[in-house]
Image: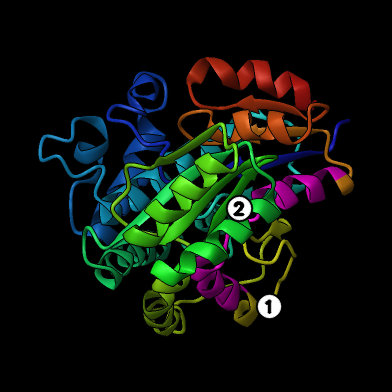
Amino acid sequence: MEKYAILFPGQGSQSVGMLNAFEENYADVLGTVFRSASKALNDDLWEIISRDSRGLLDQTQYTQPALLAASYVMWLIWQKTAKTKPSFLAGHSLGEYTALVCAEALAFEDAIALVALRGRLMQQAVPEGVGAMAAIVGLSDEAVANLCQQASKEGVVSPANYNAIGQVVISGHKEAVLYAIEEAKAAGAKIAKLLAVSVPSHCALMKPAAEALGDALERIAIHAPRYPIIHNATVDIVEHPDDIRQRLVEQMYQPVRWVETVQRLVAEGVTLALECGPGNVLTGLNKRIDKDLKSFTLKDPNCFNDVAKETN
């Protein structure tokens, strides 16, 4: 039997109607999850995900609960489908919260309220238009870090996501990010462009939000996870609730070390990675990190039985 990991995506994987294909055969799962989510959010999260008539899905405080709920639905369906259990869980940024819910370290309703708060705190930390993020492709991690250091004379800017080999996202003050983009182009980057985001995540500008989130986390019950979870900021595995709280605070202003996360999974003997959530962003990144790691998505009902055969 292959050792496999379940991976949960972060922001950017959302789309209106992302769970509509599950309505026919999994109405019971959707009903249970979204009743709980809507109660915790004090809003109709299913309407936001399925129709989004108010245009809320891409607002951070709604995107985060929506993706957590969508990925959790897919996890519950996977639990009904698969005959074996994963050896590890991990999540990209927001996906780390989904991993904690699926490992029963966080109650689902608590996590929905928590990530909605996280989204609001992130948006409040930096006025709209002041921060930015950019994708840099084709330069080494060290080269990107050096560019950020040069651009820091224009403001805060640093690597935010180490997504794949030669693919780094930077984050910070818009002027500094723009300066780094021009320097990256001059240095030979294949791509150096702004991303369509409203919040400069995973940089020092998020420290006030992280402190406020830390206060909220102290009031949330956290338990030892049932599955080992590799954390974004430190690429380690912890079990004590206080350590988990600290990891969630740190990941708001520290970079997402996704390359190292995947490399650790492989070093632990994982040969199969399953992306449990809408889209296939992580599957694409994983293939660029380690070509020998088999990667599949669980983004629609047709995937489940076929992928389950890979794990039996």
Report the amino acid beneath label 1.
His
Left or right: residue 224 compared with residue 191:
right
Which tag, 1 or 2, sits closer to the chain's start? Answer: 2
**In the rendered image, the vertical position of residue 133 relative to residue 123, given as above or below:** above
Q: Point out residue 141 in the picture as x, y percentages from the top left corner.
A: 68, 51
Residue drawn at x 74%, y 42% is: 86
The quadrant of the rendering that contains the C terminus is top right
- Which residue appears farthest toward the left when viewing the image? 54
Q: Quadrant for residue 165, please give it.
A: top right
Q: Point out residue 128 in the picture as x, y percentages from the top left corner.
A: 21, 60
Which stretch appears magenta?
244-266
**In the rendered image, the vertical position of residue 28 relative to residue 130, given as above or below:** above
Q: Is 242 in front, or is 222?
A: 242
Left or right: residue 145 compared with residue 287:
left
Report the amino acid beneath label 2.
Val
Q: Point out residue 254 in the picture as x, y percentages from the top left corner.
A: 56, 67
Which residue is identified by label 1?
240
Closest to the camera, between mark 1 and mark 2, is: 2
Verify whether residue 264 appears in magenta: yes
Which residue is identified by label 2?
144
Characterize the local packing of mark 2: few (<14), some (14-19) or many (20 or more) Cα atoms within 10 angstroms: many
Residue drawn at x 66%, y 15% is: 306
Q: Point out residue 19 in the picture as x, y percentages from the top left corner.
A: 36, 28
